[in-house]
């Protein structure tokens, strides 16, 4: 990654790439946001993606859409209880707390 960072700086400083081109703008963006973009490399054990969080959010959104079809308050209560219980079990199975691994 250090070699990539040096190469990007070299491209920008020596104007080997036109700054207004797509590649020039991408290099500028990468250099400007280098620390946040490479943070996961400095923290051991950090997952490369956030799929677990995305899946949990997707379940909540699906439930919200499904809840529009509840005909009674009792049906809504039963549906809410089932969905929350499923989410808690799924999180516990995956050892996830607040979308962070234990």
Image (tube, grey):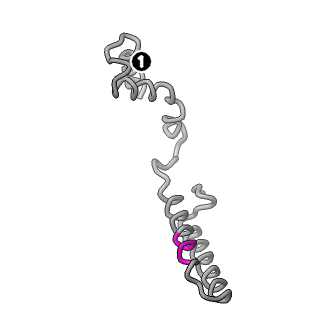
In the rendered image, residue 39, in percent from the top left (x then y), is placed at: 53, 36
Above or below for 96 versus 75: above
Q: Quadrant of the N terminus?
A: top left
Badge 1 crowding class, 10 Å Cα cut-off, few under 14, some 14 to 19, many 20 or more, is some
Task: Tell me which corner region of the image, top left, top right, bottom left or bottom right, holds residue 88.
Answer: bottom right
Residue at the (50%, 53%) spot, across then down: 50
Task: Tell me which corner region of the image, top left, top right, bottom left or bottom right, holds residue 73.
Answer: bottom right
In the rendered image, residue 76, in percent from the top left (x then y), is placed at: 63, 83
Residue picked out by circle 1: 9
Q: Give the SS element for disc 1.
A: helix
Above or below for 73 versus 87: below
Q: Quadrant of the C terminus?
A: bottom right
Q: Is residue 102 left or right of residue 32?
A: right
State the extent of the magenta-drawn residues as a range.
62-67
Residue at the (55%, 82%) spot, across then down: 69
User: Is residue 63 inside the magenta stretch?
Assistant: yes
Q: Main secondary structure of the magenta part?
A: helix
In the rendered image, residue 100, in percent from the top left (x then y), is placed at: 59, 55
**Pick the front one: 11 or 17:** 17
User: Is residue 48 inside the magenta stretch?
Assistant: no
Residue at the (49%, 63%) spot, across then down: 55
In the rendered image, residue 72, in percent from the top left (x then y), is placed at: 64, 88
Residue at the (57%, 64%) spot, across then down: 95
């Amino acid at each position: 990654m250090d070699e990539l960072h040096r190469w990007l700086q070299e491209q920008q400083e020596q104007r080997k790439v036109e700054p207004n081109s797509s590649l020039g703008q991408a290099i500028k963006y990468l250099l400007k946001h280098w620390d946040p973009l490479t943070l996961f490399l400095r923290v051991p054990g950090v997952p490369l993606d956030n799929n677990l969080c995305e899946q949990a959010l997707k379940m909540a959104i699906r439930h919200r859409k499904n809840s529009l079809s509840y005909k009674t308050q009792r049906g809504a209560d039963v549906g809410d209880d089932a969905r929350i219980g499923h989410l808690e079990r799924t999180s516990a199975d995956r050892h996830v707390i607040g979308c962070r691994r234990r």
